[in-house]
């Protein structure tokens, strides 16, 4: 779930037109969806409280118990002035704390004027919205001060009434009870609404974090072997390991560099992705580990990071599938591009070192003479063939039909014998090799 989706979900009760107006005119847009949602809800509640204050005064008048309008006027005029400043400056901090102060101070004053602290219809309950609002808006330190002020005001109001007595201009007991219920319901409804919205947001945020964590886990596991990823997450680093037996496979398209100059960048990437996407599926199906791609070269290995006794056979079976896939699409590509995408594949089994290097854009890689020999096997192949070393041939000759290619000089290695893998023996059974 994206930030925009979260914001739209949490403020669904407000029309898109109003939200767009608030974002543009009152600078409510924020990278944090929680902040944006709370600002919108805060403004909505301020409007509802202004309306409620006016209706209260009108109701008192209608019942024949006129009540001074000056606290309502102070709140409404101060709020309108705060909104004007918010519209001009975008300073939501000032507007927010202005509301907290008005919530804190005006209700006790109105309650005293309305018949005293105990007979004043519970106006003082509204003051609790100041510390609660500060908590909801993550103003933790300010919330403590507002709550302390709220408690102090209750003590002061009670003390004043205790020593000076209740004002004589009180409303009848029945009317006081009626408005006490109304004030209690209003205040607790606002408290419930804010808490529910906050808890719903936290639940939605938790779900969003779980989904994002799953995406991150999937991405990490796609970039690194699971064992290596788990080690990195638990310790912060991954220890390089030596594998006494592993099989390395290289692929490369013959003449690809010259062909690539005839294609646009988009078409080139599309074609490479077509082949490498298929190779990924084949490699995964045979339990191999994709190491990396470099240009049009694809590299994978068997027998790591989890040792496996059949890694040589698994790798050769995967190579045969890769070769067959390329052959199946050869004529199709030749017709479309005039290039058949012929591929060379080289394989060698032996000792390798595997691990993660660097601290930025880390990648799992392998090193050693086995990697170099596998690369040379690929370079010494003819297009469309799978070249394996003499050592690898000795391990699989009973299970795969192979033919001797010849002896060739290999850079930095010396002369090497190369064998071609033709196909799997019809009656062979793959077995453990190490």
Image (tube, helix red, strand yellow):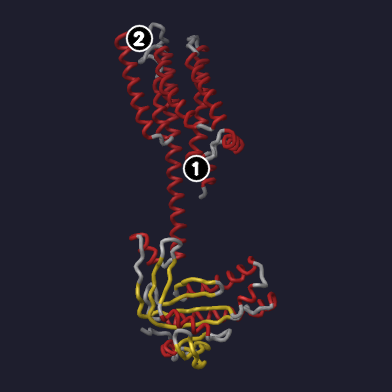
Q: Is residue 71 above or below residue 195?
A: above
Residue, disc 2: 166
Which residue appears at 57% of the width and 86% of the height? 382
Question: Residue 322: x, y in percent?
Answer: 54, 79
Residues at marks 1 and 2, CA–CA distance in whole angstroms: 48 Å
Q: Quarter-wise, where is residue 369 in the image? A: bottom left
Q: Nearer the viewer, mark 1 or mark 2?
A: 1
Q: In this view, does 433 lie above or below 185?
A: below
Q: Quarter-wise, where is residue 178 in the image? A: top left
Residue, disc 1: 33
Question: Residue 371: x, y in percent?
Answer: 44, 79
Question: Residue 35: x, y in percent?
Answer: 48, 39
Q: Earlier in the sequence, mark 1 or mark 2?
A: 1
Closer to the camera, 74 or 108? 74
Q: Is mark 2 on a helix, strand or loop?
A: loop
- Disc 1 to disc 2: CB gap under 8 Å: no
* 10 Å crowding of disc 1: few (<14), some (14-19), many (20+): many
Residue 218 placement, left or right of 339: left
Q: Is residue 285 above or below residue 89?
A: below
Closer to the camera, 169 or 382? 382
Tell me, yes or no, if residue 286 can be seen here: yes
Question: Residue 233: x, y in percent?
Answer: 37, 60
Closer to the camera, 299 or 214? 299
């Amino acid at each position: 779930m994206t930030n925009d989706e979260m914001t739209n979900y949490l403020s669904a009760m407000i029309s898109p037109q109003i939200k767009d107006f608030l974002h543009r005119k009152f600078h409510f847009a924020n990278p944090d969806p929680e902040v944006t949602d709370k600002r919108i809800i805060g403004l909505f509640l301020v409007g509802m409280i202004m309306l409620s204050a006016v209706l209260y005064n009108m109701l008192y008048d209608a019942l024949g118990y006129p009540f001074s309008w000056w606290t309502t006027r102070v709140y409404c005029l101060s709020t309108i002035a705060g909104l004007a400043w918010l519209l001009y400056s975008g300073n939501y901090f000032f507007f927010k704390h202005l509301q907290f102060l008005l919530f804190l101070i005006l209700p006790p004053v109105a309650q005293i004027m309305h018949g005293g602290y105990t007979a004043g219809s519970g106006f003082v309950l509204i003051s609790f919205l100041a510390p609660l609002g500060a908590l909801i808006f993550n103003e933790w330190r300010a919330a403590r001060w507002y709550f302390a002020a709220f408690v102090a005001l209750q003590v002061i109001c009670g003390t004043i009434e205790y020593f000076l007595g209740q004002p004589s201009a009180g409303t009848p007991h029945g009317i006081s009870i009626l408005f006490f219920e109304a004030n209690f319901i209003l205040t607790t409804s606002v408290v419930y609404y804010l808490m529910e919205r906050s808890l719903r947001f936290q639940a939605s945020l938790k779900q969003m974090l779980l989904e994002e964590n799953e995406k991150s886990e999937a991405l990490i596991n796609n970039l690194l072997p699971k064992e290596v990823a788990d080690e990195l997450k638990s310790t912060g680093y991954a220890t390089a390991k030596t594998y006494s037996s592993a099989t390395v496979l290289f692929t490369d398209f013959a003449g690809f560099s010259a062909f690539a100059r005839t294609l646009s960048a988009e078409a080139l990437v599309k074609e490479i992705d077509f082949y490498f996407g298929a190779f990924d599926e084949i490699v995964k199906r045979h339990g191999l580990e994709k190491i990396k791609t470099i240009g049009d070269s694809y590299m994978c290995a068997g027998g790591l990071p989890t040792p496996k006794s059949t890694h040589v056979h698994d790798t050769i079976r995967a190579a045969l599938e890769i070769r067959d896939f390329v052959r199946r699409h050869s004529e199709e590509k030749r017709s479309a591009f005039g290039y058949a995408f012929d591929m060379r594949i080289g394989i060698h089994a032996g000792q390798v070192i595997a691990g993660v290097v660097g601290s930025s854009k880390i990648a799992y890689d392998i090193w050693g003479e086995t990697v170099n020999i596998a690369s040379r096997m690929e370079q010494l192949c003819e297009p469309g063939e799978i070249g394996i070393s003499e050592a690898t041939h000795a391990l699989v000759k009973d299970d795969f039909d192979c033919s001797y290619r010849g002896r060739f000089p290999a850079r930095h290695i010396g002369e090497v014998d190369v064998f071609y893998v033709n196909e799997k023996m019809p009656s062979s059974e793959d077995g453990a090799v190490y």
